[in-house]
C-alpha cells in the first residue's frame, strides 16, 4: 500500500477528500480515476450514501464518471437482489455465517437432496406426478406421501416454512383429506419449495457475479503520477490536496 492509498484510507474527512479529488482541475482524468478507485475501496458506504455523480462538471472526466456510474449500477443490482438473500438466510439459519461460494454449493446440494425425496434428483418424473392420475390410494400410497412430506419438513425446518408462509398440515389433517387432495397438497409443497430453491440459487449466483465484477473494477492495478502534500484548509489542517506532477 503506497502513501497515497494510506492517506485516502486513513483520512478523517473522506467526503471532503473525494470532493477535492473530483473537483481539482490539476488532476487529469487518468489519475482522478485511480484516486477514486482507492476511495471506493475504503469508503464505499459513504460513496453510496452521497451520489458522487452529482459533483459539478464531473462529466468533463469521462473515465472517472463512467467508473463511478458502473460502480453504482452494480451496487444497485446487488441491493435489488439482497432482500431475497436475507429472507432465505432468515428461514435457513445454518447458512448464515458461510462465504457466498460455500452457500451456493450448499444450496445446490440441498436442492438435490430435496428433489431426491420425491425421486426426482435425476429426472422430472416425481412421486406425486406418478400418483396424480389415481382416483384412490391405499395405505402404501398415503405413507409414501407422508414420508416425503415429513422428510421435507425435517430438511428445511419450521423457520423456513414460517418465513415463506408455506401452509403446513398436521398428520391428522393430512389423513382427513381425500386422496386427490393429498396429491394436490404434496404438489403444492413441492412446487413452492422447488421454486424457492431455484430462485434463491440463481439470486446467490447473480449476486456473487456482481461481487466479482465490483472487485475487478476496484482492485485492478494502476499506476499514478503525482505528489501528495498536506495543506491547511478551511475545515481542518489534516485535509488533503493532491497535486499532479508537471
Image: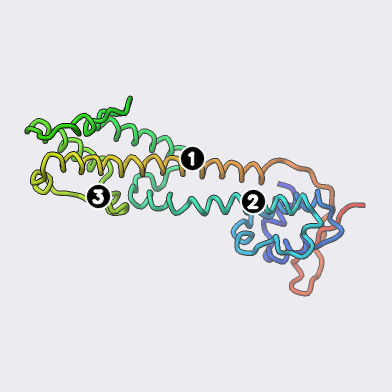
Q: Residue 169 at what x, y percent from top left? A: 16, 49
- Element on which disc 3 rests: helix
Look at the numbered disc 1 and give the secondary structure of its residue: helix
Which image quadrant for residue 94?
Answer: top left
Position of residue 31 in the picture relative to residue 146 (left or right): right
Q: How many angstroms separate mark 3 from mark 1 (CA)?
A: 25 Å
Q: Is residue 3 visible?
A: no
Percent position (x, y) of residue 161? Answer: 27, 50
Marks 2 and 1 sit apart, C-alpha to C-alpha, by 19 Å
Q: Residue at x 79, y 43 (%)?
A: 223
Q: Position of residue 162 (x, y in %)?
A: 27, 54
Left or right for 158, reference 91: left
- For marks 3 and 1, the one nearer the N-term is 3
Question: Which numbered marker is on residue 158?
Answer: 3
Label ID, residue 205: 1
Which is more toward the observer, 222 or 113?
A: 113
The circle drawn on residue 71 is 2
Nearer-N-terminus badge (2/3): 2
Q: Nearer the viewer, residue 169 or 184?
A: 184
The disc at residue 19 is: none
- Relative height, residue 139 to residue 199 (above, below): above
Amino acid at each position: 500500500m503506497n502513501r497515497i492509498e494510506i492517506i485516502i484510507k486513513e483520512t478523517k474527512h473522506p467526503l471532503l477528500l473525494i470532493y477535492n479529488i473530483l473537483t481539482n482541475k490539476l488532476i487529469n482524468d487518468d489519475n482522478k480515476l485511480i484516486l477514486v478507485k482507492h476511495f471506493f475501496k475504503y469508503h464505499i458506504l459513504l460513496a453510496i450514501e452521497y451520489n458522487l455523480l452529482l459533483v459539478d462538471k464531473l462529466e468533463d472526466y469521462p473515465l472517472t464518471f463512467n467508473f463511478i456510474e458502473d460502480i453504482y449500477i452494480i451496487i444497485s443490482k446487488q441491493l435489488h437482489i439482497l432482500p431475497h438473500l436475507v429472507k432465505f438466510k432468515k428461514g435457513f439459519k445454518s447458512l448464515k455465517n458461510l462465504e457466498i461460494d460455500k452457500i451456493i454449493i450448499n444450496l445446490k446440494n440441498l436442492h438435490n437432496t430435496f428433489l431426491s425425496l420425491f425421486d426426482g434428483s435425476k429426472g422430472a418424473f416425481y412421486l406425486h406426478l406418478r400418483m396424480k392420475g389415481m382416483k384412490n390410494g391405499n395405505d402404501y400410497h398415503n405413507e409414501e406421501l407422508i414420508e416425503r412430506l415429513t422428510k421435507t419438513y425435517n430438511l428445511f425446518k419450521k423457520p423456513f416454512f414460517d418465513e415463506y408462509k408455506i401452509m403446513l398440515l398436521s398428520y391428522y389433517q393430512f389423513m382427513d383429506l381425500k386422496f386427490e387432495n393429498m396429491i394436490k397438497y404434496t404438489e403444492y409443497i413441492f412446487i413452492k419449495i422447488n421454486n424457492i430453491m431455484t430462485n434463491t440459487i440463481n439470486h446467490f449466483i447473480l449476486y456473487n457475479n456482481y461481487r466479482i465484477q465490483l472487485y475487478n473494477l476496484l482492485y485492478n492495478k494502476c499506476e499514478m503520477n503525482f505528489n501528495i502534500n498536506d495543506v491547511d484548509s478551511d475545515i481542518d489542517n489534516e485535509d488533503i490536496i493532491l497535486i499532479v506532477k508537471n
